[in-house]
Image (spheres, rainbow, N blue to C red):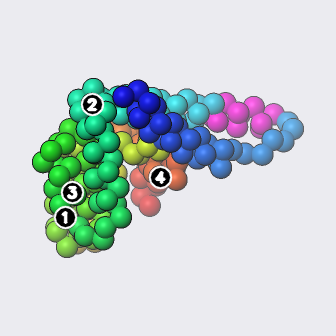
Amino acid sequence: MKKIVMVVVGVGALAAANVIRAEEPTKSEGAPQKEVSSAQSQEDAEIAALRAKVAARMKADADEYGRDGVRAIEMAYRAYSRSKDVDNEHLRTLIEKYPKANRTGCAVMYAGQRAQGSDDGKWFRLAMEKYADCMYGDGVQVGAYARLYLAGYLESKGKKDEAKKLRGEILKLYPDARTHRGRKMSEFLDSGK
């Protein structure tokens, strides 16, 4: 059981480490470097905290479902991620058989992205309500990500107040939330982008 969890956690840690490396500033001489180093240290600590949350979430899955369950979850998740369907037997298996699994929350989030609003945001709402504590291996929090996507959908439908409320929830509930590229959501939510 520990081997599977460690491999999955290791992949998430590598992804997060690659985000850090890709965004590290080049070294230069002078006083400004100390400020960058301090900011970089804080960012490194924040990403390390997210990696720890991912590891804890994956350990909870191993404790809940055991080694065979984690393997079945991963197989269903991968099968779903390779399909083009919004809803299929793999997604339904994850939701019905493994309702507490981290990968189930990620799959529900993918369903929302695939639906592209044709479902009135139902999958994003489900992700927010039942899977907000799930996390991608790179530290992206499903609860924050679902709110971000749903806010974009609502804004496109002219529901600006609802969208603004969701963005506020991200800032309040997920102050350390990051995108898949490692960017802090608060940086572009504050500026209204």
Mark 4, secondary structure of its residue: loop
Which one is earlier in the sequence, the residue at label 3 or at label 2? 2
Q: Quadrant of residue 73?
A: top left
Which one is earlier in the sequence, the residue at label 4 or at label 3? 3
Which one is earlier in the sequence, the residue at label 4 or at label 1? 1
Residue at 81% from the left image edge and 34% from the top image edge: 31
Instruction: State which mark lies toward you, 4 or 3.
Output: 3
Which residue is under mark 3?
91
* Residue 164 in view (yes/no): no
* Residue type beneath disc 1: Asn
Q: Foreground residue, 130 or 92? A: 92
Q: Quadrant of the N terminus?
A: top left
Residue at 81% from the left image edge and 41% from the top image edge: 27
Mark 1, secondary structure of its residue: loop
**As drawn, 74 above or below 70:** below
- Tell me which secondary structure the magenta stretch mostly adopts: helix
Within-10-Å neighbours for mark 1: few <14, some 14–19, many 20+: few
The segment highlighted magenta reads 31-40
Within-10-Å neighbours for mark 3: few <14, some 14–19, many 20+: many
* Residue type beneath disc 3: Leu
Instruction: State which mark lies toward you, 3 or 2.
Output: 2
Which percent across, then down, holds residue 4? 41, 35
